[in-house]
Image (cartoon, rainbow, N blue to C red):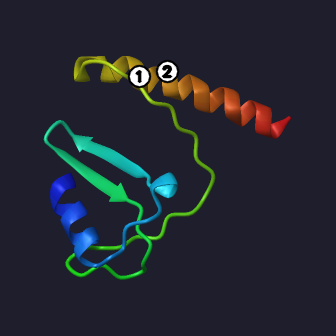
Amino acid sequence: AMTRALKKITAASAEPPKDEMMVLSECISPWYSDIYVSVAKEEVDGAEVEKISGTFLSKAFEGDYSSMGKWVEEMKGLVAEETVERQA
């Protein structure tokens, strides 16, 4: 999926500057994920372009996919901490 997305972005000359490149994924199930790749244009032929705005919290995890449950719980804790800090 990522290779197909990047080919469409390249064909549309919609690559963002390297220091602004971002890839987000939403794991809907063990067999399916939505992938969101930043682009420099509002239209990319053959791709659905979504505008995403808001405040985001991210962290990179390294390891086997089997650790996903542990990482989800860790992120829940980080989100809770950040929420308390923003409300203070």
Residue type (three-letter) at the residue carrying disc 2 = Glu
Whether residue 1 is visible: no
Label at residue 74: 2
Residue 72 figure quarter = top left
* Residue in view at x 78 percent, y 32 percent: 85
Lateral position of residue 8 relative to residue 88, left or right: left
- On the rendered structure, is 55 left or right of 21? right
Image spot of residue 44 (x, y percent) = 30, 78
On-image quarter of the C terminus: top right
Secondary structure of the residue carrying numbered label 1: helix
Kindly indicate the quadrant of the structure image that contains residue 15: bottom left
State the residue position of label 1: 71
Question: Is residue 31 found left or right of 18 in the rendered image?
Answer: left
| Quadrant, the N terminus | bottom left
Q: Nearer the viewer, residue 81 or 2?
A: 2
Disc 2: CA contacts within 10 A as few (<14), some (14-19) or many (>=20) = few
- Check the image and report above or below for 45 versus 80: below
| Residue 56: image location, x then y, percent | 58, 47
Q: Is residue 19 visible?
A: yes
Q: Are marks 1 and 2 in contact (CB under 8 Å)?
A: yes
The residue at 45%/30% (across/down) is 60
Name the residue rendered at 52%, 28% in the picture. Answer: 76
In three-dimensional space, the C-alpha distance between marks 1 and 2, rounded to whole angstroms, equals 5 Å
Q: Residue at x 38, y 50 (%)?
A: 23
Q: Amino acid at mark 1?
A: Trp
